[in-house]
Image (cartoon, helix red, strand yellow):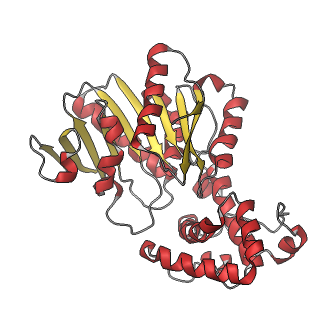
């Protein structure tokens, strides 16, 4: 079902702030999408991939009023923006690639071939951006992955598993045990994001009461500010519960893992929660696994601090893969002073996008470095 609306006068103040004259919204194979058109559209397109959503979150991504504001840097430059909600919520990297491609094909069929098409995404959507460039790059002019899930997805999610395993060993009884998270005999229940602040306060009080110095050291081991450790635990419990459901069990195995980087490594290894894998990790993480094989200009943008996807995972691992593939000519990294996951200003997003566009226009590679 497709519904195309011509909006000469926008009815709401949220929309009125955007240079949007037409919105095409509907569903492709049951998956909702939205295409935003600016005034005087000149066949320039941004395919946008959104980040991780908790299972059951409402409204879905493209229906959220914040979506319109986040797309402002692209709309203001004359680009239409097309975004899929994906068929599933939660971990949806492979589904995001497929659903975004289905939407791109729909836009081309309905409105004609754009003269330029960029792939853009935040967080998990940044991972979808890279996977799209690696596998479907022939359809794109360039890419802008922002704070992306750009390591191999298994390794990124394994980091969250290891955080829980070691935390539960050092601070037992505060966070949910991994054995419980991966127990499929119990009904699946995502934590309510509305309880985040209250739950974070409870966790922080408990860990600081037990051993504040150890809590600080533990947070630093995982590239976290101490005050962000409770949030990270809350968020990643939902991610791990979601993975357990989608994988049909536990795809991780730390029975042979030797942990290091803690104040007392012996204690951590003796106390860490240990679980064997019960399912093949390739079932969930194998499709569109990261390769580094890009052949279009790609500007990765990252904040200097990110409590969910640290730069080591977002930049260093992928940079090494790109280098191993001999594709350095297609990859540039920009960083901002942002303190938090995807904490970019619209101006920073616009600057990074402009530098990507200039690279494409001139053939001169965008310079790596700081974005004010």
Query: Visible in this render: residue 141?
Result: no
Point out residue 74 in the picture as x, y percentages from the top left corner: 34, 36
Point out residue 218 in the picture as x, y percentages from the top left corner: 74, 67
Position of 75 compared to 317: left or right?
left
Residue at the far right in the pictured view: 266
Q: Which residue is located at x 77 percent, y 77 percent?
A: 170
Point out residue 278 in the picture as x, y percentages from the top left corner: 69, 69
Relative to 231, is 76 above or below? above
Q: Which residue is located at x 9 percent, y 40 percent?
A: 8
Relative to 89, is 336 above or below? above
Q: Which residue is located at x 35 percent, y 56 percent?
A: 61
Position of 321 compared to 299: left or right?
right
Q: Quadrant of residue 301?
A: top right
Q: Quadrant of residue 367?
A: top right
Point out residue 372 in the picture as x, y percentages from the top left corner: 51, 36
Relative to 171, is 29 above or below? above
Residue at the far left in the pictured view: 9
Q: Which residue is located at x 63 percent, y 35 percent?
A: 292
How many numbered marks appear? 0
Position of 334 compared to 318: left or right?
left
Position of 54 compared to 211: left or right?
left
Relative to 163, is 370 above or below? above
Query: Visible in this render: residue 150?
Result: yes
């Amino acid at each position: 079902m497709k519904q195309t609306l011509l909006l000469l006068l926008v009815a709401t103040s949220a929309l009125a702030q955007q240079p949007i004259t037409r919105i095409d919204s509907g569903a492709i194979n049951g998956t909702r999408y939205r295409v935003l058109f600016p005034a005087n559209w000149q066949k320039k397109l941004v395919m946008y991939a959104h980040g991780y959503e908790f299972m059951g979150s409402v409204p879905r991504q493209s229906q959220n009023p914040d979506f319109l504001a986040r797309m402002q840097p692209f709309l203001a430059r004359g680009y239409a923006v097309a975004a899929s909600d994906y068929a599933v919520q939660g971990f949806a990297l492979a589904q995001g690639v497929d659903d975004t491609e289905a939407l791109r094909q729909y836009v081309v069929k309905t409105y004609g071939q754009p003269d330029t098409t960029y792939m853009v995404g935040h967080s998990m959507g940044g991972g979808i951006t890279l996977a799209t460039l690696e596998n479907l790059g022939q359809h794109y002019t360039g890419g802008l992955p922002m704070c992306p899930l750009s390591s191999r997805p298994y390794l990124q999610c394994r980091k969250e598993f290891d955080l829980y395993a070691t935390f539960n060993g050092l601070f037992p009884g505060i966070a949910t045990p991994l054995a419980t998270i991966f127990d499929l005999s119990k009904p699946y229940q995502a934590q309510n994001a509305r309880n985040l602040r209250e739950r974070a306060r409870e966790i922080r009080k408990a860990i600081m009461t037990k051993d504040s110095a150890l809590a600080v050291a533990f947070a630093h081991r995982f590239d976290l500010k101490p005050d962000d450790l409770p949030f990270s635990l809350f968020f990643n419990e939902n991610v791990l519960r979601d993975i357990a459901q989608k994988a049909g069990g536990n795809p991780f195995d730390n029975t042979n893992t030797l942990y290091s980087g803690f104040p007392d490594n012996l204690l951590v290894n003796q106390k860490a929660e240990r679980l064997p894998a019960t399912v093949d990790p390739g079932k969930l993480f194998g499709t569109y696994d990261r390769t580094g094989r890009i052949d279009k200009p790609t500007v990765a943008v990252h904040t200097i601090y990110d409590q969910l996807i640290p730069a080591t995972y977002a930049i260093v691992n992928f940079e090494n893969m790109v280098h191993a593939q001999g594709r350095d000519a297609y990859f540039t990294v920009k960083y901002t002073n942002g303190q938090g996951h995807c904490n970019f200003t619209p101006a920073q997003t616009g600057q990074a996008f402009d530098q990507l566009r200039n690279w494409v226009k001139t053939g001169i590679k965008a310079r790596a470095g700081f974005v004010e």
